[in-house]
Each structure stands twice: as structure tokens, then as C-alpha cells.
Image (tube, rainbow, N blue to C red):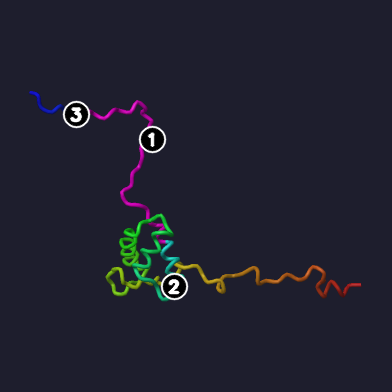
Amino acid sequence: MGGRQNLRRPLPRSKDPDQQALDLEFEPDTGPLRRILLDHLASAPVGRTVDQLKTYALPETVYRPTQVIPLLKRMRDGQEIDASPGRIIGASAITAARQEGLFRPARAQQPSLWRMRAPPANRLPPEVASRP
């Protein structure tokens, strides 16, 4: 025959039946990127453009800028953000939708323990001080 040899060999079978299988994911978990972008949007009252968010994602996160637009589309569909115009392109203005529980309350709205004053240690309450 003198033609090509069949170079395809069967894959070797594992000798360890309890071998751990690796789970490969084709789509990364973008939950952390979602939280990072929401915090970044919350810090800008007028919002940011899609291009600004993509530029921010490159050095500040482990995510690629190409993962920002699909995530923003899901966030828009979930009503977590507002996009103007409704179509998400590089120049679209993105603002965070103010929903209950989406943002942490501002420092002035948080109950604060540091505002409560304890009585000075060297002073006694008036009812104790008036005792003979």
C-alpha cells in the first residue's frame, strides 16, 4: 500500500479508577465582575460609558474587556442598570438602577456606634454622686 500510516492511537485509559475529573467551564463566572461594575457605577452619580467600563475592567479585574458588554446586557435585562440609548454600544451611558438592597446605605444612613457617647469614666451619674 505504501500510503500513510494511521497515526491516531487510542487514548490511554487511566489506571486509577478514583482519578479526579477536571471540570472545564466555557463561560467564566462573571458574578464578581458584576459586583465590581455595580460598585464602580455607584461611585459615579452621572454614570459611565461602556467604553469607560471596558477600560476599567482591563487593569482592575481579572476579566477581559470583551466580557463586559454581554454582562451589561444581562444586567440591563435584569433591570440592575439603565442604558441610554437602550442598545448597549461603546458610547452608551450606563447608570446603576437604584433598587432596594442593591446598594449599601450611605455612612450617614448607617446606625453608628461611634456617635453614641459613653459617660466619662471620672464622672458619676447624679443619683450616685448625691449619696452621702
Q: Which amino acid lies under the numbered mark 3 shown in the image of this protein?
A: Leu
Residue 50 locus on image (x, y percent): 34, 68
Residue 110 shown left or right of residue 22 in the figure? right
Q: Is-magenta flag for residue 109?
A: no
Q: Earlier in the sequence, mark 1 or mark 3?
A: 3
Tell me the quarter of the image containing the C terminus.
bottom right
Outermost residue to the top: 1
Q: Secondary structure at mark 1?
A: loop
The residue under label 3 is: 7
- Quadrant of residue 81 within the rendered picture: bottom left
Q: Secondary structure at mark 2?
A: loop
Residue 88 locus on image (x, y percent): 29, 68
Q: Residue 20 got which mark? A: 1
The residue under label 2 is: 44
Bin the neighbour count of mark 1 within 10 Å (Cα to Cα): few under 14, some 14-19, many 20 and up.
few
Asked whether 92 or 95 is in front, the reply is 92
Residue 31 locus on image (x, y percent): 40, 57
